[in-house]
Amino acid sequence: MEGYRGFLGLLVSALLVGFLSVLFVLVWVLHYREGLGWDGGALEFNWHPVLAVTGFVFIQGIAIIVYRLPWTWKCSKFLMKSIHAGLNAVAAILIIISVVAVFDYHNVRSIPHMYSLHSWVGLTAIILYVLQLVLGFLIFLLPWAPPSLRAVVLPVHVYSGLLLFGTVIATVLMGITEKLFFVLKDPSYHSFPPEGVFTNTLGILIVVFGALIFWIVTRPQWKRPKEPGSILLQPSGGTDGLEGAIAISSDRSPDAADAELSSDGTARKRTLGLDDAGQRSTM
């Protein structure tokens, strides 16, 4: 990997900032917001920020960069697809539970649903995220999708994934600010109370985590290399190596592909040896 030390430094930084984000949101609800529960009250609502930051921000961020980890490049592409899909599925489950907690809390308190910009953008992001997960599973993980369809969908899948991740971060920041305006009355939010400063720091950590994930995933030199036995497919069905093509692995196992490459190399060496012998015989 080119720039391995830089990659490792950014990866460690992203993991550290991500863990701190999860830790900060837990301290916020356990220390400042009286803890967690499932009784339709404020304690149930507190699950919403905890699960949103843990699942929709941290776990989704790890799922985005899982292909970039060089230690996994010897693993099969199918295994890495499964890990990528599994992490995203966990994130989807956690965010759905967090939304159930909010609706339950609103029902108990007779609070209207879906009136804020945070709720509009957030619910839209969740619906699109689940749709992205289902389509990704059907097209990229199951074997029946033709390679030409994968070539067409892949750029959209990558772009929409990054767009949703950025949207999620913006939505979480809106939710944090909205919550602080609701609960900080005496002292008020604008008087810099300890809870406000602490939670603003949580927001900064989330932004930094998102920035690190975006930087890691957009560096071309840290992209997972092609597997042996794969070919480049264009959306139009061609097989040349133009920009925008994707690598589609053959149905053979990696061992079979390696064996074929080895046999091809041996055949080439044998041919070259015969050619050299022929040239020496004619000299």
Image (cartoon, grey):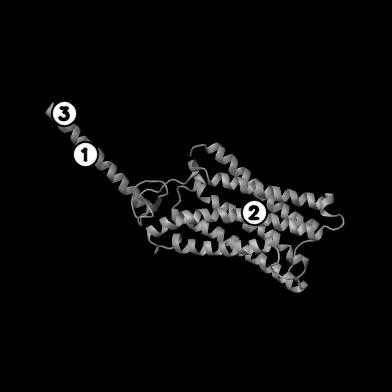
Q: Which residue is mark 2?
A: 169
Q: Give 57 or 190, whichever is nearer the viewer.
A: 190
Residue at 55%, 44% (x, y): give it: 216
The secondary structure type at the circle numbered 1 is: helix
Query: Contact, CB < 8 Å: mark 2 with mark 3?
Result: no
Q: Give 174 or 217, whichever is nearer the viewer.
A: 174
Taking the image as shown, residue 202 lies to the left or right of residue 247, namely: right
Q: Which residue is mark 1?
A: 271
Q: Position of residue 149 (x, y in %)?
A: 40, 60
Q: Is residue 200 above or below residue 141?
A: above
User: Residue 52 is drawn in which quadrant?
Assistant: bottom right
Q: Amino acid at mark 3?
A: Arg
Real-space Cα separation, disc 2 to disc 3, in angstroms? 70 Å
User: Residue 53 is drawn in which quadrant?
Assistant: bottom right
Q: Is residue 76 above or below residue 283?
A: below
Q: Position of residue 5 (x, y in %)?
A: 55, 37
Q: Amino acid at mark 1?
A: Thr
